[in-house]
Image: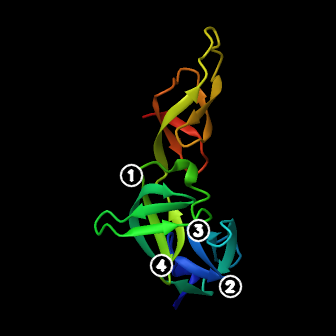
Amino acid sequence: MSNANANDVHKGQAIKFNGAVCVILETQHRTPGNLRAFVQLTIRNLKTGKSSVERFGSSDKLEIVPITRTKYEFSYKDGEDYVFIEPNTFDNLTLSPDKVAKIKDYLTENQAVEVLFTDEVVAEVELPSTVTLKIAESADGVRGDSANNVMKIAILETGLQVQVPLFIKEGELVKISTEDGKYLSRA
């Protein structure tokens, strides 16, 4: 582990903050009026999954935690566990439900993910910003129900429920944001 000035850290790095490993989601260098410059970091605690905004002086030392990212594909669910495969070496990685709790509603067979490791231990599994999922169940839109942006609930192939426009039918593929779980468009 090495130290770096708060000014020198960037998005995607991991730091040790309050005894926990945190991934930097966003950095902003700020100089408000006649006050001293500071760095504002949006960080996510890898243990709790909670995000927070923290301020550091430009020259504050932060402990950088080495982090490696490896691309995997979701292969199948084995009982309670989730099995991922590394596409180049075909190495299997089995993760417990608590490691994939936040992303399980977006996982389909062959779904690409990025696994973050700190000290050879899985820290987090990251999805792309959008995923394409199939509509498993959806009520038909009622003719004449065309007021501005009328939405209905649809159940996706993974069991996730989302609000979709009335014109979306069962069996269609839709793009869903993995950040907020909202419908974006047809696929």
**Alpha carbon of mark 4 to alpha carbon of mark 1: how far?**
24 Å
Amino acid type, label 2: Gly
Mark 2 vs 3, N-terminal side: 2
Q: Are marks 4 and 2 in contact (CB under 8 Å)?
A: no
Q: Residues within 10 Å of mark 4 (few under 14, many from 20)?
A: some
- Residue annotated with mark 3: 28
For mark 2, give the secondary structure. loop
Name the residue tied to disc 2. 19
Q: CA distance from mark 1 to mark 2?
A: 35 Å
Q: Answer with mark 1 or mark 2, whichever residue precedes in sequence.
A: 2
Q: Is residue 80 above or below residue 12?
A: above
Residue reaching furthest to the bottom: 2
- In percent of width and height, residue 173 lies at 45, 33
Q: According to the image, label 1 marks what residue? A: 110
Please tell me which of labels 4 and 1 falls first in the chain. Answer: 4
Q: Position of residue 55 (x, y in %)?
A: 68, 75
Look at label 1 and name its amino acid.
Asn
**Residue at 46%, 48% in the rendered image:** 108
Of all residues, the one furthest to the left in this rendering is 88
The first of marks 4 and 3 along the sequence is 3
Residue 42 is at least partly visible in this image = no
The residue that appears at 69% across and 65% down in the rendered structure is 50
Residue at mark 4 to residue at mark 2: CA–CA distance = 16 Å
Q: Is residue 45 left or right of residue 119?
A: right
The three-letter code of the residue at mark 4 reads Ile
- What residue would you read off at disc 4? 67
Report x, y in % for residue 171: 47, 28
Q: Mark 2, mark 3: which one is toward the viewer?
A: 2
Q: Quadrant of residue 26?
A: bottom right
